[in-house]
Image (cartoon, coloured by chain):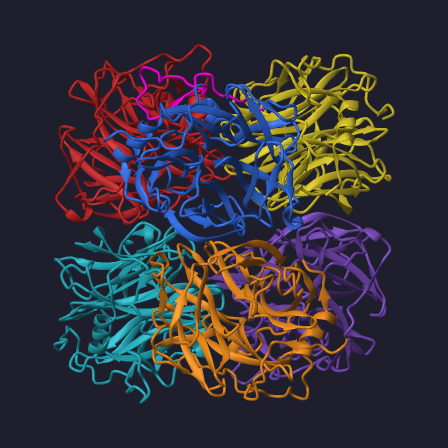
Chain colours: A red, B cyan, C orange, D purple, E blue, F yellow
Amino acid sequence: MTAVKVIGQPVLPNIPWEDPPATNRAPMWRYSRNPVIPRDLIPTSNSIFNSAVVPFEGRFAGVFRCDDWTRRMELHVGFSDDALHWQINPEPLKFTAAEPEIANFVYGYDPRVARIGDRYYLTWCNWYHGPTIGVAWTDDFIEFHQEENAYLPFNRNGVLFPRKINGRFAMLSRPSDNGHTPFGDIFYSESPDLSFWGKHRHVMSPVANSWQSTKIGGGPVPIETSAGWLLIYHGVLTSCNGYVYSAGVVLLDRDEPWRVIARSAPYVLSPQTTYECVGDVPNVVFPCATLCEGPTGRLAVYYGAADTVTALAFSYVDVMVQFAQDHSLLAA
Amino acid sequence: MTAVKVIGQPVLPNIPWEDPPATNRAPMWRYSRNPVIPRDLIPTSNSIFNSAVVPFEGRFAGVFRCDDWTRRMELHVGFSDDALHWQINPEPLKFTAAEPEIANFVYGYDPRVARIGDRYYLTWCNWYHGPTIGVAWTDDFIEFHQEENAYLPFNRNGVLFPRKINGRFAMLSRPSDNGHTPFGDIFYSESPDLSFWGKHRHVMSPVANSWQSTKIGGGPVPIETSAGWLLIYHGVLTSCNGYVYSAGVVLLDRDEPWRVIARSAPYVLSPQTTYECVGDVPNVVFPCATLCEGPTGRLAVYYGAADTVTALAFSYVDVMVQFAQDHSLLAA
Amino acid sequence: MTAVKVIGQPVLPNIPWEDPPATNRAPMWRYSRNPVIPRDLIPTSNSIFNSAVVPFEGRFAGVFRCDDWTRRMELHVGFSDDALHWQINPEPLKFTAAEPEIANFVYGYDPRVARIGDRYYLTWCNWYHGPTIGVAWTDDFIEFHQEENAYLPFNRNGVLFPRKINGRFAMLSRPSDNGHTPFGDIFYSESPDLSFWGKHRHVMSPVANSWQSTKIGGGPVPIETSAGWLLIYHGVLTSCNGYVYSAGVVLLDRDEPWRVIARSAPYVLSPQTTYECVGDVPNVVFPCATLCEGPTGRLAVYYGAADTVTALAFSYVDVMVQFAQDHSLLAA
Amino acid sequence: MTAVKVIGQPVLPNIPWEDPPATNRAPMWRYSRNPVIPRDLIPTSNSIFNSAVVPFEGRFAGVFRCDDWTRRMELHVGFSDDALHWQINPEPLKFTAAEPEIANFVYGYDPRVARIGDRYYLTWCNWYHGPTIGVAWTDDFIEFHQEENAYLPFNRNGVLFPRKINGRFAMLSRPSDNGHTPFGDIFYSESPDLSFWGKHRHVMSPVANSWQSTKIGGGPVPIETSAGWLLIYHGVLTSCNGYVYSAGVVLLDRDEPWRVIARSAPYVLSPQTTYECVGDVPNVVFPCATLCEGPTGRLAVYYGAADTVTALAFSYVDVMVQFAQDHSLLAA
Amino acid sequence: MTAVKVIGQPVLPNIPWEDPPATNRAPMWRYSRNPVIPRDLIPTSNSIFNSAVVPFEGRFAGVFRCDDWTRRMELHVGFSDDALHWQINPEPLKFTAAEPEIANFVYGYDPRVARIGDRYYLTWCNWYHGPTIGVAWTDDFIEFHQEENAYLPFNRNGVLFPRKINGRFAMLSRPSDNGHTPFGDIFYSESPDLSFWGKHRHVMSPVANSWQSTKIGGGPVPIETSAGWLLIYHGVLTSCNGYVYSAGVVLLDRDEPWRVIARSAPYVLSPQTTYECVGDVPNVVFPCATLCEGPTGRLAVYYGAADTVTALAFSYVDVMVQFAQDHSLLAA
Amino acid sequence: MTAVKVIGQPVLPNIPWEDPPATNRAPMWRYSRNPVIPRDLIPTSNSIFNSAVVPFEGRFAGVFRCDDWTRRMELHVGFSDDALHWQINPEPLKFTAAEPEIANFVYGYDPRVARIGDRYYLTWCNWYHGPTIGVAWTDDFIEFHQEENAYLPFNRNGVLFPRKINGRFAMLSRPSDNGHTPFGDIFYSESPDLSFWGKHRHVMSPVANSWQSTKIGGGPVPIETSAGWLLIYHGVLTSCNGYVYSAGVVLLDRDEPWRVIARSAPYVLSPQTTYECVGDVPNVVFPCATLCEGPTGRLAVYYGAADTVTALAFSYVDVMVQFAQDHSLLAA
């Protein structure tokens, strides 16, 4: 392999980091002080997980899924100096929506934040007569401008690319139904204007007899590299007693991201620690955000653990790219 | 009620027509020689139903769902002088698609044809990694130009409005899942260019304890009237031994067609004759097209019967409008 | 067999009657002019079936299930001179309820009427946060006094005995759940006052590998005989393509009616004619009422056919009793 | 196509026969006096269908599925001079079983009879802790010797080949589960001795988007031809309101019958007449036996219609072979 | 809020008690030595949970759900001086039943004990052709007199009020079906004599998008206060990988307990500790009994944890009342 | 009880062993250093469990289920001196198959190894158009010769007896369907040659209201004793939130092993420790192998824990036999 070039990622000296343990042989290793965000960081939270963090003005900002004691699913904004200790606003995020039809917030969960140009774009699972993909943008993490929902219901796991592709906004999503669906493929769509979406392309399906045999969905915002878009995603296996949510890695073509270049057959992280196996939802590892330092390729991956807390794992971009290439499936 | 004005419908002296029987007390009455199209009109058809007819150059043209002996669902073009006797092309319709990704036709069913300006637009349930809405246009019913699929899977019952609304193409559809889903609401969407769709709006839901309690979907292309868009649609009830598909009527706002003005609580047609109750799918009345004469308001409604044959029923626009108004539900 | 004595049944010279056809070898034979009540006897009825008729002041009265064009399930009162030609009130029956909590009528279906002493008692499937058994009484078939619902939801097929047993009102019913449940046994309960019910006893279950293998429910009000209570009931089989509803016969102990004396293994009537096999619900024979003449033992059985029309079949009490005895299963 | 040679079929001048109607364009045409066996041919039968007939000593013998008024599924023996008018024994067939463990008959249905050498072998769906394949033989259609069940439960549609293959008995079957399973492939197995079965080979699967998309199962005993084994089988489609059972044709390799040579994409018969669409099980065409005259290649196919009556259709061997070849799918 | 008066609760100086930890901000706090009863307290118990304790003759008595090594669900009697250390009889409780029909004990679980006057009444989930509510009384916790089952199957979570209301026994219950039902509302019923039950009233339903969105059921015997009946109950959420059982609080009208005065939107306790998340049934908090001291309003709540052990949590009556009032939902 | 003689088991001085703890009152006690095999013993294993070990040439050999990071289910060979510390080959086992049709290995899991004569026979759940029972033999644990699959799909938990019975190979198995089936009985079959299987006999079913109420399956290779074949097996209970897999014990007739002599009503081991309750599949104890020393009757039972690791428990043959006899159910 020639060296992988990381594209469009900042210098980020304050990225959280730990070197891998000496015995590590996996492509990703856990933060030794996990969980990084406990379930009760704000006074009324039942759980804080599946959350989106980004570098912001020399510090860090984030949008967090906080379920309250009613188990209502809300989004909350937070800030941090080191991306480890967070001040999360106990009041839920309120959107500004020009369009009244979509302004009625019923629930929102599993946010992702993409920086495109100098603006931050938020996508999340938004209820509009069923789950679909909500879209909003902010310049300051104070005011959030809600755009049209991207698709008809039913959809989940909407993830924007961090730049336009073919001159258009580009999004991955996972069409589904209105329950905890036992199926789901990843698709790609484009939009000239964030209002109208089209050119839908099938990207990839679950893989039989594997950790991703039931359904899959995009994870953090993809990272551009000379080897293709690096996408971490989750996959679900139906065991003989429930589901297991693990994480995998895939490389997508830079210009036609619905084409799979390499997709790792093994997972890169699966629920094995107590905080991943025990909680409101057993056996869940669900990555939703990364911090990435361009010059070093360091990756800090934020993931929900057991739908209860937020945990952190580390890797390098080139380790992940090589892992995908070395253990590649044909795209299915 | 002041007189209802029918808008945008042609003079159509050769519209099929029968006056209602003397004893009729329903808003719609059946053609006495039903079924108008038998299941085996073309040599290899298992069934011909859920089909789309329009006036065309002084005669009539249509796109027909013909399931063959393999039970493959194909679309076929046909022509007629009187809209009663049809010459259907035994070869399936082939689309011309500029975009190879979508050119692979797997199956297509339940077509609707809308005339918008001087061009004819076809929508149908099209497989692309699941059922979604295919879109094509033709000027001559010979060459059909396939556009992008309108939505991500899973969707069915895509019905275009016969003119642009708010300067854009406008479509009703019914998001669903990948099986014979026991739920389904009608939504409205717009497109500036037939490639990108957005501004999705919820229109209406099933109604508990009624003929439309399980799912609903748009039927023929809506008819513009001074009282609103007249939409005939189907609704499904889950009996204690299977489904029953009936037809109802609703008036939608002319400028914001996702707003329901009046929606009839009773059905306007339900499966009661042998050809509606017995066939490949028992107990189905499924309207997909109307012919409408502007000056008289005569309506000829083409509907699939038992998913096997095509039948015909008659009414007047003002009878239908008044029925919706007189028996109106709140929009649910 | 010694002669069976029919107990408590009137002289009823105007009972509808036809002798069996010469070739008949079944315990019950159909009326040659079935259906006796068509689906559209009243102007807005979609269907009329599963209905309750009784002798009343030298004529006949009845409470009928009439589903309207909305497919709303309502009860209607009707009268007849010959029990064949009926005048059914097009307005639904309205109950007088002393208790406001239960006065809100949502839907009602499948009525039965029992005469106990000189008063007529109506039971039906009544919605109160789910289906349960509604109870009312009338002296004149004009005013109906609604009592407390007999049970908590979910229940169906409540059938009163025509006299008190052990000094209390006695009812059969079929506990179930809130859908078209694939299971269901018949139970027996007593009440001192029609408000409070208890002493619940299990009567009988479905029978594997038979016409009654999925679920069963009581039919017409039982007829007292020297051989026990004669109960006609329905049973459901799950075929490889839907349900089949047939009718059977069982004898219950006169003093402890939860004890089965004899239960016919074969059905006495199953859907075989077009009006039983084709309609809103295919393959349904569902008896809800009998007329019985005491001195002759003649039986006229009213049953819903295909959940669409009302049909009539004939038998003799002693034929039915002997059929149960000659083909008896152990109670299961 | 060179001429197809029919192998191992008798001269059979009294085979039932009608030439096709002038307008026929299908590979199989119905007997004009269908149903050939009514549901009530014996005094206590609810239905007679899915039955097995063979030439026997200059006349015809058969084993018939007769469900009685209890809806108990039994097998009955019958004889006929013309294969149209049958004398069916009202007493169910009783097996002689050397092995007591399998001698307890719970239910049996859907028989097939194969002549191998000079002996007649019966297979049927037999309950032994679930449905499996019962096997018996007879020399006289009076005494039936029951062998071991061929397989573990759960299995259905066991069909023997009419001669040994590779020196062993050969059978097709359809593994399934313990209900009305929505899936099912055809497999092939061999036995040296009718006691032990093995060398299981997968033959073919359902075909997506077709009349045989849900499950398939073997039909009559295959007919050997120079072009391969001619197998008529049934396939099931899940419509939007229940199942449809149709019949198709496939050619299997003569020496390795698990290899598909040609398999017709279209059906050869599907439920379209009233007696096929209306009955205990709507929309069922289920072939279980053929008579075949060697010199002429005439085929008389006996099939159950609506799980209620037995019907008859005609074809020629070479018509069927050519239909399979001309419309062949790849084996799926 | 004016002070809440606790009504009808004893002076109880030996009630188990711990003050809340300094950091506590929840309305209920756990006992620091949980679980209070281990799974193997008696020699053959697999688990001891969902149990009922009451003050009794200066000490404490209880009826405990003990599943044995066969996983048979039995009830056992126990006594304690301090309500923390229990002597549980290793022999299951045997009922004395005057009525043989109900005397056959198949299984019993989830007991509650109410003191009404000077007598103790036990309710539990009792199998009688399906789960229903068993009722018995005792004066000495030695002899238990079994009454009629309160309702027809299917029912669970029967909870008596601790005094008669409107001169009658009063009970909450949760009608359901015969499996682990995914739905369930709380109802109220009355009985003059513990034999016959009626006047059924709907109390409340699950609440969408919350910890109690799937089903709810009554918990410990309600506590009368000047602000209404204080009822702790359980609610179930369907996560994307199984159920979560939490506890909530509601105030019911003192005279018409089917009327909801205030119902807390948040839960008061949810599974968060290892002994609540890990065990025979993951993620279960299931309160079945309270001890309450009248003068101080101290509450000791006994709850099953993970269907494996019994745990204890503390609160004050006025804290709970105020929590319900301050976070109240409209009754749903 | 007279002394139980252990038959056909070796002198095995190096069997792993711990005496029971002083407080033990169960028939089986856990190894104090469990899990004996961690999930990551080989570099790419996600989990190692449900595995088969045997004495081999003075040491121990085994076939292990190792799921890799793809969650592909593979079999791996391993060796050990003390049966506690294992060297497992990181390369999956490859079979030599004379028959190409079955040589395509898709997945394999849950192996058992039986020594019959001087040869070792491996059975496992093997995919061939669905899960079925794979069979292979080895003399050296290097080369494994794959035989025909024993049965048609769908089957699991194939367990050979350690000697021929009635002159034939003998196997237990559990027919099922193609998912995680909620039902399953144990059957017995014989084969003269490992190619053809027959003489299928039903052995036993689940037991209602117990730890084994949903499905059961054979565990380790049975141990012959003077009291019958000692079979440890697993059973599954459906709790109100998922499955629980426990282990039980049964004695089978030595000559007709389908006859149950004694079957313990209680379990002998159920998931109670963290490593049994928490892991890829919560709440699983799944025994697949035993070591047994003939002279002492010592038993070391290897079982999968939470489908993640391999654990060890100890007992004596006579303790197990007596436990089955003392707590025996009738065979169900």
Against C144, residue E321 (above or below) is above
Q: Main secondary structure of the magenta part?
A: loop
Q: Is residue D245 visible?
A: no
Residue F107: x percent and y percent?
58, 36
Residue drawn at (82%, 29%), measured in percent from left and top? F224
| Residue E120 higher or lower than C224, as above or below | above
In the image, residue B269 lies at what x, y percent?
A: 34, 74
Nearer to the camera, F45 or C240: C240
Query: F156 left or right of D265?
Result: right
* Image x and y of residue F320, in percent: 75, 26
* A216 horizontally vs D330: left or right: left
Quarter of the image with the C terminus of chain A is top left
Among the 4 quarters of the image, the one containing residue D164: bottom right
Closer to the camera, F269 or F117? F269
Residue C324 lies, with reference to residue B259, above or below; the image says: below
| Viewer-nearest residue: A34 or D136 | A34
Numbered-mark total: 0
Magenta includes E32? yes
Would residue F69 be counted in the magenta stretch?
no
Name the spot of residue B57 as percent of width and height, x first: 21, 78
Question: In the rendered image, which quarter is residue D88 located in?
Answer: bottom right
The magenta region covers E14-39
Query: Which picture quadrant has residue F289?
Result: top right
Q: Split into 4 quadrants, where in the image is the N terminus of chain A?
A: top left
B14 left or right of D300? left
Report if residue F240 is visible in the image: yes
Left or right: residue A142 compared with residue C303: left
